[in-house]
């Protein structure tokens, strides 16, 4: 397992060389030498309204989903036009991508499909195809902060038709091996699992509790050779609890599980947030103050990467609980109090 510090130094060195293949030569600002690397989770569209606000946010990166299905809908035919445009858009604002490689195409999926299914898991016969694809992503985008192998694969929302820790472990191991064998220095990150508790899993039996999932994926001498383990310590699914205290408790549970089974492997927070809408809403001011406290706890834990979910509020989110997490309102112009509060908490300037 490669230490994170070496990977970050390698990324900094790669900035001078540009982005390699696949487009122009973006030169984002160097990563900070000390303190956490701070960014946002967002479904960025190239030339989207409000994207210019990213340049004022103080962030170093944006975590972006990269759909395998969209790039390689036909086996062997890959079109990176859209992710190239996203990479170039981020570079214009001094940011780099943290790619989340997800969604198997129908030809590689665990279910037969005539129409593409979102978050379709790869079949066991096509895990190496995913790994090969992820290795090309790492080679094509050497400035990337990392390659996160899927998103929340412990719940059926994001690993269809049904989560399987054993299959995901095989996928993660194959991907880490393929990316490292390519010579890429882009870190490979185990996907942050949804913060599902044992109580939630008893109510929805397809879900796997996040601590159990981390342990099953990363335990043992033949564990995947990843560079970091992701965690998503949300409190939005909890009831009758202070959301900040609950977030910190879930963070501690996740980091403790990672340390038990994979001591020395860094933990990255690849999503965390507080919402100002819906049944779990807090006030905009509480969102700012709460995220400040959460970032302080993450930094105190020595976690080097912090990803706030998300940058923009969604007008019509795919899931009702997704409303209100942005630090910018749905009009993509109005900054909430959290816009600069999160940057200041991470020790960076905000415009």
Image (tube, rainbow, N blue to C red):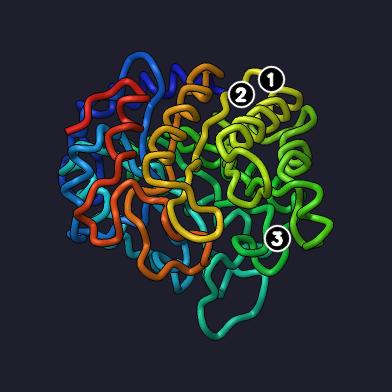
> Callout 2: helix, strand or loop?
loop
- Asked if residue 218 is positioned above or below residue 120 in the image, the reply reads above
Marking on residue 265: 2
- Badge 1 vs badge 3, beta-carbon distance below 8 Å: no
Marking on residue 26: none
Locate residue 26, reporting x and y percent. 18, 40
> Callout 3: helix, strand or loop?
helix
* Residue lying farthest to the bottom in this orientation: 114
Q: CA distance from mark 1 to mark 2?
A: 6 Å
Q: Nearer the viewer, mark 3 or mark 2?
A: 2
42 with respect to 165 (left or right): left
Q: Nearer the viewer, residue 14 or 300?
A: 300
Marking on residue 263: 1
- Badge 1 vs badge 2, beta-carbon distance below 8 Å: yes
Mark earlier in primary sequence (3, 2)? 3
Label 3 crowd bin: few (<14), some (14–19), many (20+), radius 10 Å: some
Q: CA distance from mark 3 to mark 2?
A: 26 Å
Q: Nearer the viewer, residue 178 or 205?
A: 205
- Asked if residue 347 is positioned above or below residue 88 in the image, the reply reads above
Quadrant assignment, res 57 = top left
Residue 177 visible from this viewpoint: no
Residue 127 visible from this viewpoint: yes
Residue placed at 52% from the left, 35% from the top?
Answer: 269
Q: Nearer the viewer, mark 1 or mark 3?
A: 1
Locate residue 310, reporting x and y percent. 39, 48
Residue where numbered disc 3 is placed: 124
């Amino acid at each position: 397992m490669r230490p994170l510090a070496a990977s970050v130094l390698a990324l900094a060195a790669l900035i001078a060389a540009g982005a390699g293949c696949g487009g122009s030569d973006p030169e984002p600002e160097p990563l900070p030498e000390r303190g956490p690397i701070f960014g946002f989770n967002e479904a960025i569209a190239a030339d989207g309204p409000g994207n210019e606000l990213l340049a004022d946010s103080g962030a170093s990166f944006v975590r972006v989903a990269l759909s395998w299905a969209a790039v390689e809908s036909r086996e062997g035919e890959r079109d990176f036009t859209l992710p190239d445009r996203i990479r170039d858009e981020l570079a214009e604002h001094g940011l780099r991508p943290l790619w989340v490689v997800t969604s198997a195409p129908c030809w590689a999926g665990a279910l037969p499909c005539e129409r593409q299914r979102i978050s379709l898991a790869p079949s066991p016969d096509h895990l190496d195809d995913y790994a090969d694809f992820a290795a090309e992503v790492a080679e094509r985008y050497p400035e990337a902060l990392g390659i996160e192998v899927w998103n929340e694969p412990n719940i059926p929302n994001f690993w269809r038709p049904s989560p399987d820790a054993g299959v995901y472990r095989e996928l993660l191991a194959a991907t880490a091996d393929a990316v490292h064998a390519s010579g890429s220095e882009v870190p490979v990150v185990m996907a942050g699992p949804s913060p599902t508790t044992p109580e939630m899993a008893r109510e929805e039996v397809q879900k796997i509790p996040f601590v159990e999932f981390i342990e099953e994926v990363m335990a043992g001498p033949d564990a995947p050779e990843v560079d970091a383990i992701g965690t998503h310590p949300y409190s939005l699914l909890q009831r009758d609890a202070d959301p900040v205290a609950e977030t910190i408790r879930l963070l501690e549970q996740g980091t403790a599980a990672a340390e038990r089974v994979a001591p020395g492997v860094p933990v990255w927070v690849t999503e965390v947030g507080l919402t100002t809408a819906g049944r779990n809403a807090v006030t905009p001011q509480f969102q700012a103050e709460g995220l400040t406290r959460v970032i302080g706890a993450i930094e105190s834990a020595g976690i080097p990467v912090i990803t706030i979910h998300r940058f923009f509020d969604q007008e019509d989110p795919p899931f009702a609980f997704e409303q209100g997490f942005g630090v910018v309102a749905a009009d993509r112009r109005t900054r909430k109090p959290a816009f600069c509060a999160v940057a200041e908490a991470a020790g960076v300037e905000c415009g």
